[in-house]
Amino acid sequence: MKICFLGAGSTIFAKNILGDCILAPTLDSFDIALHDIDSQRLDQSFSLISALNKKYGGKATITAELNRKKALENANFIVNAVQIGGYKPCTVTDFRIPRHYGLWQTIGDTLGIGGIMRALRTLPFLDDCASDIAEVCPNALFLNYTNPMAMLTGHMLQYTKINAVGLCHSVQSCVPHLFGYLKMSDKLEGVKWDIYGINHQAWLVNVLDKDGNDLYPEIKERSANWKMAPFQDRVRREVLNTFGYYVTESSEHNSEYMPYFIKSRYPELLLKYLIPLNEYPRRCRRQIRGWKWQSRRILSSEDNINHERSHEYGSRIIEASVTNTPFTFHGSTLNTQGLIPNLPLEACVEVPITVDSAGFHPIPCNPLPEQCAAMNRTNINVQLLTLKAHQTKEIRDIQLAAALDPHTAAELSLSHIKSMCVALYKKHHKDGFLPEYRF
């Protein structure tokens, strides 16, 4: 069995996923191929994963490859964690140019103009990757962890032959975090919940205690005073209080998926909901500094390398596929089977999925509450138009995707949206991260 990790320069995330696999009790000896285009970071990841493997039994054979096709050769599983363009220059561009037009963002990796440009930079890589996979490992399962999740996974499933699923950790952490914020952790044991929607905007539709009692009335009563919420939860509490359901992803993410929270006309909302503008660039700089310190510490001695199995789905999906022991998780897949009846069939939705040796088996869900489906559709519009822009290579289609983004449309005029898209395209194209588009 072979696992190929694309974007292995993301050393800490590679450690989490591959360390989980090394610790997985049902996985015998297997191969790991690490791939990245940054040779220095690839070497660091190779050293760390090799030391981790040695410490926990040495059952994996690890190689590092700058050549993607060679890394993919005969892979059974592919973990994708690439970031095309990195913090510099691309993330900086995605924030700096919109800010010049008066458009502020928090994360900019899933929706909005930042998510649109990030998708358009990544989709050519996925097309090239699909060609390699078709040639050297056509039956591999592709586990996509790269954002924007719905756009990238939707493209792979609709336009390539890759057997893909999108994975995120916001679903499995949703209920524990909510109960922790509300001081309800004593009711977590045996709790049952239903969550589905789209990535980063899936909805906690039902939540029952171990005896089958509906916990939503208590959740709503405790959530009514959003001023008591920690900063991580203020936007989500307002969404719960207004729309009636709790949403999976964090407040800083959700503040830019909707038109209500980041508004130049109402700057007091930023303080009211404690919304951190420019959070992702700040987080990138902090992570870069942290990794430099952490890499020196970890790589200085094998005694500093430890791992406990994380809550990420990746290793458990691999185990289930190898052992044919079904495992159910939440992942992103196409809605072509009407998995969520009141969302578009071409949408990429986040639903429960069972995996075994035969592959992925999505589980149909009930219709979403209509207000939740309506909110999802505003995001799906942007996702589908971004995928169209990648197919047509027309600047106009990028502009249409941005014009229908809830946050962008609430802040900018159409003329400014069009000019901003052109400026972003020209900068990314000049830096070598976007192909030719027609004006």
Image: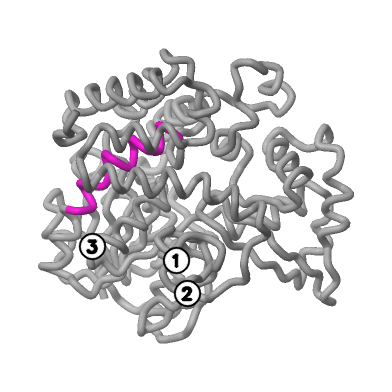
**Quarter of image, res 95:** top left
How many marks are shown on the rendered structure?
3
**Quarter of image, res 276:** top right
Residue depicted at x 25% and y 44%: 390
Residue depicted at x 43% and y 26%: 285
Q: Amino acid at mark 3?
A: Thr
Name the residue tied to disc 1. 335
Horizontal and vertical percent position of residue 197:
56, 58
Looking at the picture, the colour scheme in use is one colour
Q: Amino acid at mark 1?
A: Asn
Q: Earlier in the sequence, mark 3 or mark 1?
A: 3
Horizontal and vertical percent position of residue 69:
12, 58
Q: Residues within 10 Å of mark 1 (few under 14, many from 20)?
A: many
Residue depicted at x 65% and y 54%: 174
Horizontal and vertical percent position of residue 302:
38, 50
Name the residue tied to disc 2. 362
Real-space Cα separation, disc 1 to disc 2, in angstroms: 9 Å
Magenta residues span 112-127
Q: Amino acid at mark 2?
A: Pro
Name the residue tied to disc 3. 160
Real-space Cα separation, disc 2 to disc 3, in angstroms: 19 Å
Asked if labels 1 and 3 touch by Cβ distance under 8 angstroms, the answer is: no
